[in-house]
Structures are given as C-alpha cells and as structure tokens.
Amino acid sequence: MSKKIVIVGGGSAGWMTATTFIRCFPDWDISLIESPNIPISGVGESTLQSINTWLRLVGIEDKDFMRDCDATYKLSIKFENFYKKGDGGFHYPFSEPDLDGTQYGLNDWHLKNIYKGPLPNSDYADSMFSVMALVNEDKFDKNIDNKLSNFKYGKNTSYHFDATKFGQWLKDNICLPSGLTHIQKEVTEIVKDDDGIKHLVLGDTNITADLFIDCTGFKSQLLSSFDVPFNSYQDYLPNNRAWAVQVPYLDKQKQMHPYTSCTALDNGWVWDIPLWSRIGKGYVYSDKHASTDDALLELKKHLSDKGYDPEELKYKDIKMRTGLHEKLWVKNVVAIGLSAGFIEPLESNGLFVTHEFLIELMRILQREEHDDSIVATEFDKGTFNLRTTKMFTEFTHFVILHYALSARNDTPYWKELLNKDYDWELLNPNITISSGMRYLAMDRMSNNQFQPNGGPHCVAAGLNWHPIDRITEKLDINKLQEEQVDFIVQYLDKRKALWKERVKNCQTLYDYLKGTIYKDNA
C-alpha cells in the first residue's frame, strides 16, 4: 500500500515540497490542495548558494528552469548604507575565502586595515574572495573554476528568479507529469483525532493522508489548528511590512548585476533583484517607525533618484510575520515555508528555509521509504524540530548582526537598533545559543581570529567590526616588522590584480545570458 502525502498550499513552497516528495519517493501517492481564491505571495526572487544541494537532490539543472523563470545568476549580496549613510557598501560573496599564501588567514586583511587604512569596507571581500573579480565587473563565466581559486560554479552560484513562475514550472514540468493529484478547492474544515488530522473537508469531499504538509503561508492553516505557540521575533527584527514593485530596465547591460543589492533607507532597506526581463524592488520597513503611506513615499523617492517615474508603477503592500512556531512537526502535520516561520527578506532566507527544511524532512523520512505506512516516532519528530529550529535561530542571529553592528543613528529607527540590548537566549529559549553576537565575538574566533566558514566575517568587516588587537597572545601587532606588513599588503593587492586579469576576457552577465539561456529571446 502506497503512503499518502497531502500538501496544502501552492506557491513556491508547495510546489517545491511536491517536487521533493515526487523525486525522493516516486512510489508514494502525492496530492496538492491549492485554494483558487488565495493569491500567491510571489516575492521570494533571490536564493542562496545552498539551493544547489536541493536542485541536485531533485535532479534539476539550471538550464532546465532558468529561461521559463526569468532567471539570472547570482554570485553575491551587496549591502549599502547599513554601516553609515554613504559608506560605499560591501559584499558577502558566495564562495570560500582564499587563504592560500596568507600569513594569518583572514586577519591578513585586518592587519592591512590597521597599518595602511582605514580601507573601504568593500576591500575585505575584494582582497579575500576571488569571485569579486567577476562581481565588480558585472561578469559571469560558467567555466571560470580553473581561473579563480576557491570558486566552484556548481557550488557557489545561486539564482534570481520569478518565484511564482518557478512554482508553476515545477508544477507543469515535474509534478503533474509525474502523476501528482492537483486539487483546486478550499479546505473548509480540519477534523482531528488523537493521532492528528483525521481528514480535511473540501466541500463535500473528505481527504485523508499519512502525512499532511502545511504550505499555507503566514496563515499556517494546518499547524495553527493544534494551537502551537508562535515565538515572535518582532522585538529583535522590527521590520514587518514591505512595499514590492516591479520596474523595467533603463539600461539592461548596466543594471544587470550578478548580485542582489540591499540599500538601507530611513526606516528599513530596499532590495534590488535583477531578473532577465525586469528588476524586482521592494522596501522592507517597520510600521512602528513609518506608516504605509510614508514608507511608500520613501520608496517612490528612492525610485525617482534611480531615474524612474514612480507614479507609472504598481505597488504591492505585504504584511510579514517574523518568528517561528515552537514546533514544526506536530502529530501528522509538518509546516514548510512561511507557515513554519519567517525571519525577514534580508539574506534571501525565505526560499533558503524552505529547501533546507525539506532536506531535513527527507532525511527523517528515508527510513520509511519501503514501509507500508509512515510511523514517525516522537524521536523522529523531535529530531526534525530540533534541527530546523537550531538552523532557523542561527540564521536569525546572522540577520540581526546586519543591524546590531550598524553605526547609524540618523533616524529613530536606526537609533533604536543601535541601542537595542540583544538577549540572545530569549530569542529562542529552547536552543543552546551557538550563534549571533556571542557566536561572532567568541565561538567563531580562536586566538582572536575569525574562522573562514559562513558569512559573519564578511558582514563584520563590512560593518567595520574587527576581531583583533593581537594576532595571537605571542604576536603583538605593534611589534610586526614593517617588511612583514608590506609583504602582507603587497600579496593581497597582487592577487587582486591577478584575479582581475584572469577574468578580463569574460563576458558580462548580460552578454553571457543572451548568448546561452536567452539566445533566442534577447
């Protein structure tokens, strides 16, 4: 007897979930219930490099979906005005830093900054990440691996795409051809028993399942029926609304960057996501500090400064709920996507949480593959809840760092963030804290040296937060010989020049896409 999975909710989360089950458990009976009356949020247009793990899991290559989803390649995230107004910005590139030939690892740059600075905050990524040679010139090359150290195309590249189109592509190209049952009806009642959901009522039809997946967005229709507490992050991340807008290219070749831009304004920040045919923009803000009308005026001014006529554009008002449910797997219900929780759009975490939670769920369910029915133990559910909550909490701390390390105090919004006392334990009392400010300041540093994995060191350097007064207890920076410092500085600058030379003949991202993915649709 085939196991039956019922997914409630469409959108990118629902169709990514359906795709994952179909590809990982092709013999199972998969259904997706989608309300014909609830609009799709459809604003998650930017991804992180970890999406490649999920794409490999479900057997999808970039060439399969990019053209149909208005997609472009992404190599980095740029943050501007987060440290101070007019700070010039900094990048968080998607690869490992190149430590080959360095004297003290990542601290070589901090030494350079101490002795030869102050340097632009952008110089950290330029000095430590070879991929910045592409990013700074708006270039892209799928075969650059052998020219740029520590950059791997299949691992370190992510995507900008139309999330609504991506969900529909999964539906039309994988889910429906694989036999998924697509039901377009409203769930009018949830009938429960001691084991969880007994059945869903869809008008005159009852739907049963071994496992129900809640992909109903902020509504959390299935999970909320169990009265699972929701831990709000509003006190730590005040942004709770967004104005989204789609704008045309004014100069496609100049505006198509291989990175997402995040520009801080008076009461939040604006995203800029270059797709193939248009740019996605949106203002993420706190309605405690700006009304919806005032925020829209801020966004319109930003657009006007960029050369657009803001009165010709259409805007979408989005309410966001930041936080996480205390448990994501309760009885026979699992929440995936926004129904589980949401941090805020910074660092492209919405789709990240979706595919990472799905991977965790597949790990738990794989031992059920050949059983007649799903018999998930409380240990299984507890393991999933622990892993996903820990992952979500650590990512939340990472996002908070972008605000906590800011030195802006020019508006009440930024002053509040500047003076906020972050109680990391209270953010999620059920998780042992191993990230966040303490993670950055202590756990991820040994002998006053950043560890190279992850992004905290990029954000810290970009926000002018430096780890060292000493390299180690035995090496006082004031006693470093001038020749040693000059060697470090010359080495970093020399390899920057080398990386730039190696990408000299690479195409711009626009030209590369025009000649490959979109060669018949330029």
Image (spheres, helix red, strand yellow):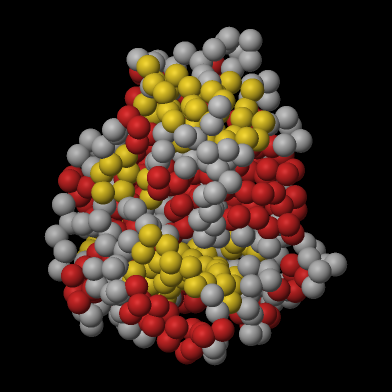
Q: Nearer the viewer, residue 343 or 128?
A: 343
Of all residues, the one furthest to the front in this rendering is 204
Q: Nearer the viewer, residue 351 or 504?
A: 351
Of all residues, the one furthest to the right in this rendering is 520
Q: Nearer the viewer, residue 275 or 43?
A: 43
Count the labels in the image: 0
What x and y, as percent, mark residue 492? 47, 72
What x and y, as percent, mark residue 451? 36, 53
The quarter of the image holding the N terminus is top right
Q: In this picture, is 202 found above or below 130?
A: above
User: Relative to 199, is 117 on the left or the right?
Assistant: left
User: Relative to 131, is 175 on the left or the right?
Assistant: right
Residue in the image at 52% along x and 85% along y:
311
The quarter of the image holding the C terminus is bottom right
Residue in the image at 54% along x and 49% along y:
37
Q: Is residue 297 visible to the viewer in this orientation of the structure? A: yes
Dividing the picture into quadrants, the one containing residue 229 is top left
Q: Nearer the viewer, residue 42 or 270?
A: 42
